[in-house]
Image: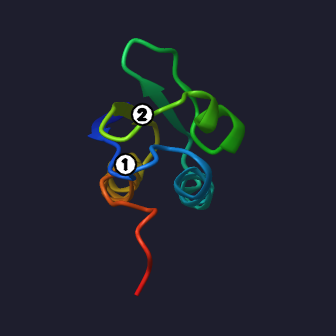
Amino acid sequence: MAERTVAIASRVGLHARPATIFTQAVAAAAVPVTIAKAGGAPVDASSILFVMSLGVGHGEEVTLSADGADADRVLDELVALLATDLDEEQK
């Protein structure tokens, strides 16, 4: 099982728009991924409700885990996504 830890860059944390973008990317990856807050239980990262229920704020760290042939690639892409401010206006 592959794991990555990343600090959330979005200024509102992993809520609303950032959570939607993240969960859609997880669902498109076709690899089971979990996300956990430090000291918390992992939840299904493709579920918007589970992800938002973690209450992850800006700068807090989460750990992503995945299993499968493309797990490392998928996690690298998801880490890059979470390390970006997904609330920033697209130009």
Secondary structure at badge 1 equals helix
**Gap between marks 1 and 2, in whole Å?**
7 Å
Label 1 crowd (10 A; few <14 / some 14-19 / many >=20): many
Cβ–Cβ under 8 Å for marks 1 and 2: yes
Q: Position of residue 21 (x, y in %)?
A: 56, 60
Question: Does residue 7 show up?
Answer: yes
Image mark for residue 75: 1
Q: Position of residue 25 (x, y in %)?
A: 54, 60
Q: Which amino acid, by three-letter code, is at mark 1?
A: Leu
Residue at 56 percent across and 41 percent down: it is 32
Which residue extends farthest top? 39
26 vs 38: above or below: below
* Side (left or right) of 62 relative to 54: left
Q: Which amino acid, by three-letter code, is at mark 2?
A: Ser
Q: Nearer the viewer, residue 3 or 91?
A: 91
Q: Nearer the viewer, residue 11 or 43?
A: 11
81 vs 45: above or below: below
Q: Position of residue 58 (x, y in %)?
A: 36, 41
- Which quarter shows the N terminus? top left
Per the image, the residue denoted by label 2 is 65
Q: Earlier in the sequence, mark 1 or mark 2?
A: 2
